[in-house]
Structures are given as structure tokens and as C-alpha cells.
Amino acid sequence: FFFGNDQGLLAVQLSVEMTVLPAEELEFEKRNALYKDELAARLDVLSGFINTVKPKAEAASQPTKPAPRRTSVGAGGTVTNFGVDYLYEMFERKDLDKFRAVGGLTGLASSKYLDTNLRKGIDASSVPDRREKFGDNCLPEAEMMTFWEHIMDALGDTMMLILCAAAVISLVLGLTVPDPHTGKIEYSTGWIEGAAILVSVTVVVFVTAINNYTKAQKFAELSAETSKRKVNVIRDGIKQQIDSTEIVVGDVLFVSSGDLLPADAILIDGVECKCDESTVTGEADIVDKDAEFDPFLIAGTSLMQGAGRAMVTGCGVNSTCGKQLALIRESAEQET
């Protein structure tokens, strides 16, 4: 249909556009489908690469665990190197493998090892033998400074040394240099100033030494009194209260919230037991305790929550606290 030149041209143009437009849309859809397929293929490749690399990265990021020490097990499943060192290493590392090697709680309490009845406790008659074999629950007292050492410590103060030097210089000058007014050496008065300084230094040093020595003695007495706490144990099937220093390895100990644990012990049973082990580990986190995954109650730590029973496995110098104290004192002696 033609309606003049312009109308005819417009009709032809519309006809061509209606014919070409579907073809362009079809081409666009094809290209879009190709792009989608290519993108999906690249995503599959990237996902496979991530799944391959991620496990390797996670394995590399985890710390390498040191090889555990071998536990010597003899005939009948008995650990042949069992003793105070074995028990200490078990607690130091919280080594469940060593714990299981002796048969867990029941195996450790058996007659092969600690010979403890988990319900009735130990026989009271066995206390001397246990004390001789595993040690008592007393930590060695630190050596107190003698009075003479306190005097030398006070005299080593910087100000005291300066005053002593000034006194010596004053004595030397007073007894060797002539008086500028008289031109003579005043032996009768030249020593007074230096001697006065030395007397002052002597008084200060002795007063300081006496105070420090008295305080050290009182602190030692107070520490000895506070270390003797009353604890509840069961012996011969009877619950009784004893001093913490009388605990021996094998004792069944009753613990409750707020207690400062007097010895290393294995948790027998308990209700919601939580310990503050910051004195040992330096970490302020409260640690949950249970008889299966973490039954280790460490000497010197505090039971913050819960109550239960535990079997003593290390006390005194053979406990975790005792070993650490010995190392601290040894390093301090080496520094001095």
C-alpha cells in the first residue's frame, strides 16, 4: 500500500524493521546463553580449586603436635615405668593417653598402681608406706635470709653507698688537709663530720635490717599457718577431716566450690565442676572438668563451681605446683 512517496517509504521501513528485529533478539539470546555457559564453567573450575586448596591450608595452619612419649607396657597391661614421674607427666600435659594406658580411673585405683577403693578410700595403715613411696604433701620452705644478709642488702642501697663514700672522703680530707684559717691539720675535730655520716649510715642500715628480718619471720609464720588447711577425705570407709599436709597419694578427697586444691587429683565424680587454672597456665578462662574428657584437678588451682570427689595422684614436691615452685627457686638461685 502506498500513500504517496513518504507514506510508502515509511511502510517499507516498518516492514523491514519487523522482519530484522526478531533476528537480532535471537542472536542476543544466543550470545547471552553462551556467556552463561562460560560463566558456569569458570565457577565450576574455581569451586574445584577452592575445594582442593582449602583442606591443605587448614592442615598447614594447625600446629604440629609433638610426638608423645612412649609408655612402656609390660605383661598383663601393666605400665612398667609407673611412678611419681609418670603421674607428674600425665598431669603436666593432661595426657589422656597415659591415663588410659593405666586403665583409666578404675585401673589407676587398682592394686597394680595406687591400691585405692574409690568408695571406701585407702586403708589408714597404708599411710606411712604411701608417704615413703610418693612423698608427703609439704613443700620445702624457702631459705630465709639471715640477719647479716639483711644488713648487706640494706647497705647495698645506692644512697647508703654514696653516704659511705662521702664519709670516707670527709675523713681523709679532715685528717690530711690543713685548716685554711690556722694552716694546721685539726686532728681533734677533723674526723667529726665523717664519723657523724658513718654513724648515721650505721643506724639506718641496722634499723632497716631489723625491720626486714622481723617482717620475713612473721610472713614465714603466716604462710605456715595458712598452708595448713582442713580437708575432708575418706579412709577405711569413714569420712574424716585432716590437715592438707597429711594428704597422701591415693586418698579420696572431697572438693567443693571455693576450695584451693591441695594436691593433684583425678576427678572421680562431680556436679558441674569448673576450675580456675590461671595460676598454672596463665589463662583466665574457667575450665570445665568431667571424669571423661578432663578429669585432671591440678594442685594450686581453685574450684570455682561445683562439688565432687577426687583421687589424689601427686602431692608436695611431686605435684604440679611443687615442681613449678622448685623450677622457679632454681632459676632464681641461678640468677643470683
Image: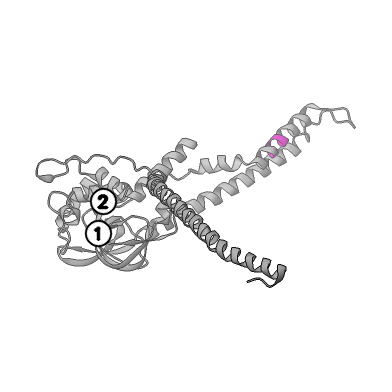
Distance of mark 1 from mark 2, alpha carbons?
9 Å
Residue receiving disc 1: 292
Q: Please provide percent x and percent y for residue 163.
A: 70, 39
Secondary-structure class at tag 1? loop
Amino acid found under the numbered disc labelled 1: Glu
Q: Nearer the viewer, residue 90 or 140?
A: 90
Q: Is residue 167 above or below residue 203?
A: above
Say left or right for 214 vs 310. Answer: right
Q: Is residue 100 magenta?
A: no
> Which residue is more in the foreground, 91 or 326?
91
Q: Find residue 316 and report its horizontal and vertical position in percent.
A: 31, 50
Q: Determine whether 74 is above or below 187 in the image.
A: below
Question: In the image, is residue 166 part of the stretch drawn in magenta?
Answer: yes
304 or 293: nearer the eye? Answer: 293
Relative to residue 100, is residue 48 drawn left or right? right
Q: Position of residue 193 (x, y in %)?
A: 76, 39
Q: Tag 2's secondary structure?
A: helix
Q: Residue at position x 16%, y 49% from top?
A: 113
Identify the magenta region. 163-167
Residue furthest out toward the right = 181
Bin the neighbour count of mark 2 within 10 Å (Cα to Cα): few under 14, some 14-19, many 20 and up: some
Question: Callout 1 environment at 10 Å: few (<14), some (14 to 19), or many (20+)?
Answer: few
The amino acid at mark 2 is: Leu
What percent of the width, then of the height, locates residue 205? 61, 44
Nearer-N-terminus badge (1/2): 2
The answer to whether mark 1 and mark 2 are in CB contact below 8 A is no
- Where 192 sits versus 225, above or below? above
